[in-house]
Structure formats: C-alpha cells, structure tokens
Amino acid sequence: MMNKFKKEGYTIYLKEIYLDEKSNSEEKRIEIIKNYFSKNKEHIDVIIAFDYGATNLFLTYTDSIISKIPIVFVSELETERTIDFKNITGITSDYGIGRVYKNGLKIFPNTRKVYVWADKSPTGEFFMKQAKQTLCAYENEGIEIEYGVDAKNKEELLTKFRNVEPYSFILFSTWQVDDNGQLYISNDLYPEIIKSTKVPIFTVFDGFIGSGFIGGFVQVAKNNGEAAALKSVRIFNGEIPEKISIDNIPPVPLYDYAEIVARKGVFAALPENTVAKNIGKAFFNNHKILVTLVSAIIIFIISILILRYKNIILNKKIKFKEEHEKDLQLNIKLLSSGMPSVQILSWDYNERTNKYKIGGSLNNQEKGISQEVDPEFLLNNVIPEQREEAIEFFHSLLTAEDGSEYVKEYLRKFDEKENYSWWETRIFVELLEDKKGKYRKIRGINFNIDKHKNIEQKLNEALKKSIQSDILKSRFIANISHEIRTPLNAILGFTELVIDSEDREEQLEYRKIIRENNEKLLNLVEDIIELSEIESGFIEFKRIKFDLKQFFEEFEGLFKYKIKNGVDLIVDSPHKSCIVFMDKQKLTQILKEIVENSIKFTNSGHIKFGYEIIGKDKIKFYIEDTGIGVKEKNISRVFDRFEKLDSFEHGPGLGLAIIKALLDNLGAKYSLESKEGVGTKFWAILSSELILVDDNNIKETNVEIDNYISKIQ
C-alpha cells in the first residue's frame, strides 16, 4: 500500500491501530477508537479499515469526530449490507468459498468429506456464516460437509486435526483464539497444524500457502493494499466518499504446486489463471528421474572437460620433458661415473637385442658401464609381492609412445645376501628406427631411497598419531565442556533461587542440590586431573606389603550395605593368608569402580569378587555379576572416554577410562566378558614381586600396619 502511495506521488505518514478483535470486546474496541480520535490533534486525511472486524465497527459506530473523516474499508461484507454513513467508501471482497470447494473436489476427486473450520472471532464467525450460505447448495451431492470446530485449547485443536477422516480435505479460514479466549500466534500455531494434519488444507488467505497449506481462491494482501491506496488517492484529489462506488476485488487462485504433487492431486483441475508457488520443487518431485538423469549428464560433460584440460596440461609437460631429455641422459652418465659412493644404478634396455646395459654403483662397488644382463635379472630381484606388477609394467613399456616418462618405486635387492630396500626408478622411452624397423630404447636410472622411505613411513605414522591425538583432544574437550556445563548451570541456577526464595525449606532443598552438583563438578575435575596425570606419565605407584585375605574383608565391608535386596555378595578368598607387594590404593580404585557398576545394574542373583594366583608373580583378580549385561556390539566401547552404556558406567563416563589407563600403566592383562540378560565378568592379571601363601594360619594382626611399625622402629 505504501509503495502505491509513493508511486502516485504521495508521501504518507501511516499510524497503525490494532483493535485486536480476538481479545477485545466490541465495546472495548469502540473505546479504543474514541480515545484515540478525541486525543489526536493531528490532521487525519483518511481512515483505512482492513478485515471484517474493523470494517464492521466503522459501519455500525460513528461520532462527531469520526463522521468528518473519510473512511475506506477493505473487507468481506454480507451481500445485503447497507452503508448508512456518507463518509464511507471501500472495496468488498469475498472468500471464494464455493470456488475453493468445487476446485478442491476436482483436484482430489476421491474426496468423501469436507471440513469447514474457523475460530469464533468476528472474522471467523463471519466466514462460517458465509460458508454455510454458500455451501448449502452442494449438501445433497454426496459429499458430507462438517461445519465448525470446538477446541478449548491448542492440544484439543491439534487432536481434531490429527483425527480427520481419510479421503477428505479441510477448508480453513483462521484459528487464533480458542473457546476459552486464549490467543495464539499464527506463525507458531499454523506449522503445528500443518504437521499434525494428513489431509490437504485449503484456505481463503494467502499467508501459509507454500508452507503447508495447499492453496485456494484467496485474498492477496498486496492487491487489497493497492486498491485501498487508489481509493484514498481519489479522496485526496477532492472526490466525496459517498460518490465513490464500492468496488469488488475477486479472489485469486493461488496454489502450492509442490503440495499438490506430494498429495497426488490432479493438476488439470487448476484454473488457467492460477498463481503458482513452489513450481520448481513440484517439477523436481514430479520428474525426479529426468532431473537426476540431466544432472548426471551435466556432471559427466563437466568431468570430460576437466579430463580434457588435464590432458592438455599433461601433453605440455611431456613436451617440456622431451626438450630436456638430452640433458637428463648426460646427467645420468655423469652420476653413474662420478658418484661411486652413492647407491645409483643407471641402465638402458634395447628392445632389439632384449638386453639391459647397466652401470653405476651398488653397495659402494662400481659396475662396468657396458655390462649387459638378461632382463629377467632386473625383474626377478623385485620383492615377490611386487614382481607381477613389475613384469606387467615392463611389458607396458614395450608399447609406450616415444618420449613417455615414468616414475616407479619398488622393493628390490641386487644380491642374495642383501635385504630388500626401496628403489625409485625414473624411465624415459625413446622410439628408434633401423633397417629392420622401429624399436624402443628404454633408459632409466635407479636411486636407493630406502632411508627416505623409512623417514616417510615414520612421518606418516607420526602424522596419523598426531591427527588421532587432535581428534581425541577435540572430542575430549567437547565432552568435558558438556559435562562441566551441566552441574555448573545447576549450581548457578539454584544459587539464584536460594537468593530469591524466602521459604526456609526451599532454601535447604536448593542448597542440597547445589552441594550435590558441587560434588559432581569436583569429582569430574579430579577425574580429569587423574586421567591427565596417568597419560602424561606422572602417576606414581606406591607398592606396600598387605594381606589379600584382610584386603578382601575390608573390601567386602565397603559394599555390604550398598547392594540391593535379593542380591548376594560373595567373596572368593581362597587362602587363609596371601601377602603381596602391590599398590593397594590403585588396586582398590580399580576393583571399586567395577563393583559399583555391578551393584548399579544387578537386581537379582549375586555379585562375586575374588582372586587366584597364576604362576610365581601373577595374580588374577575378577568380579562377576548376574546383572543385565552389556550388548555384544558395545563391549569394545566400555572403556572408552565418556561412554555411558545402559548397563555399564555412570557419572560423566571417565571412571572406566581411568581404570583402563591405570591397568595399561601397570602392564596388566585385562578383559571384560558379558552377555546381555545373563551377566558380566571382569578380570585383570597384575604382577606382584612378592606372593607368600599360607593355607594353615590366618594373620591375627594387620600386615600393612605391622610392616609400617617395623619401618619406623
């Protein structure tokens, strides 16, 4: 509308007043108008009223101020409606309900039922009134028509949209207020309606056509705005509103082609003057095979052009190399004769004689420049795994073009006593001619690149480790950030709640939550520090003498009251005394982490832990349970960082990663065996410099304390 004013040469100051018919009563809206115009001291040239609610208000109410201001309305109106005030003119529009209905049946000929829905706002009620008047003529044609939708809230409305019958469509006007007067924003609600509905939705407004509504004969806001501007311009030019005829703007057929294709509608049923939306998307959906084929052809042509370009570049390079070939041959001779201390072998092959002529230096021993050997010599000294490839390459040289150049790398040796080493072969093919015809002379030079290959291999391995390290570091930082953020947000959030709350019990509950999250955060930081120390090699193992019999009695006490009812705790300590020399703290940490997982995921049966001696200096510790187990596909991931499988690990997911790092640093062998629904068994074999077994006597005193006392004495 403003663009139209500007095009007609007018600069307009526009003041918008939203009467909000969905939440304000008619009395309230009249009060808004009266207050505005009574207090407004600026000159008003025209009032433009859009939609039925605003138009109806100005057609039924006037006063001494409003009656002196020209009014232009743009709205649907009842056909029998009369204009009683002389300062009003406008443009009427109609919903095109009949045309939408008939066109919908043509697009979807299998339709058995039509739903006509709108809210209970003035605009919605006017639409329903018009729909009933228009569609009553079609009610006996075998199509069931259902008018209106009652919904006390959004959920009830969405349920009704979900439950519409198949082979039907919806003729929709507006729904922005429920039966309880709750308001909704169309930009938020309509996408949910579209998502919930399995049948086509026709409409009389253009707002969401192209975003889920299939279309219809609609009022286009741009057209209505321009028409209102032209009426206003006539008033500006001196015409009296009463003398300006009230025109009608017919609705425009506007349809989403992609939505029609998706719902298998009939395109031929669309009017000739249809304004299309998403026509490109519709074409693609309707001609996927053709579009894919054309795209493939285009890609193929582009690939051919790229290959052609590369071929031109390659030919230029070959030509350049040909120009410098003589210099290369001279350099080969110089290298062969002048660098006996370097492992270089120059050679040439004569296709006519089927002989190699070699020269150069091998293992610091210079070979004769005219030494001729059989071709099999240079082919059979290639490592067996590459020999077939080398033979095929040699035969390909016998058909190569004049001036062709090649570079190959092989593992080979020239003496049975040597080990295989890496050699790089640079080859130039020359096409010659004599009385017998054309033949090829193949010149080459071999460089021993074994040192470079070893360096390259080490660099590649280092690069892979570096890349893997970067990936693990990035993943670690991302996971740590997430794990730290959760308790930190809880601490910050509940701290604010403690400050704002005046209820003593609430404050105590919030403080409890803050303490719990503080402990989680502290434990996480301690886990991170411990894992970093282990992986950095700063971990210190403190080995002491202690009795495994006494150790497992203490260990049993840690969990005796933590297990669930119906679960037995079994300790397998096979000897009356077994004194070992190990890091007791780390052993406790390892076993404790595994047992805590067993307790968490074992609801019946038993949890059993114990040990057995293997050999002179090895002890196998084990923990088994009858818990829910781990899926076979997840077993390999149990010890990974931040893995929190349903049946293993709790907290942030670092506990088992720390255990793995500890076991690796201790040089232990370990494994986890599990079967889903049956249970899990973990075992680890650790070394001990001392293993003293006594099957006759139980130690009456604590071995660890006795050992400490003996040291300080």
Image (cartoon, grey):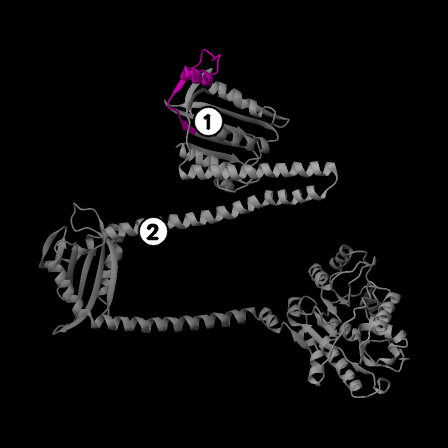
Residue density around tag 1, few if under 14, some if 14–19, many if 20 or more, within 10 Å? some
Q: Circle 2 is placed at which residue position? A: 460
Kind of residue at disc 2: Asn
Q: Is residue 206 above or below residue 539?
A: below
Q: Residue 668, labelled with which disc?
A: none
Residue 322: in magenta span: no
Kind of residue at disc 1: Phe
**Residue 630 visible:** no
Q: Is residue 383 above or below residue 401?
A: above
Residue 712: in magenta span: yes
- State which region is magenta: 685-713
Q: Residue 621, labelled with which disc?
A: 1
Work out which quarter of the rendered image holds the N terminus and state it.
bottom right
Q: Nearer the viewer, mark 1 or mark 2?
A: 2
Q: Pinpoint residue 417: horizontal percent, then vertical percent.
A: 16, 45
Q: Pinpoint residue 340: horizontal percent, then vertical percent.
A: 12, 55
Q: Pinpoint residue 90: horizontal percent, then vertical percent.
A: 82, 81
Q: Residue at x 39, y 49 (%)?
A: 466
Q: Secondary structure at mark 1?
A: strand
187 displayed left or right of 706: right
338 displayed left or right of 100: left
| Residue nearer the viewer, 438 or 499 | 499
The first of marks 1 and 2 along the sequence is 2
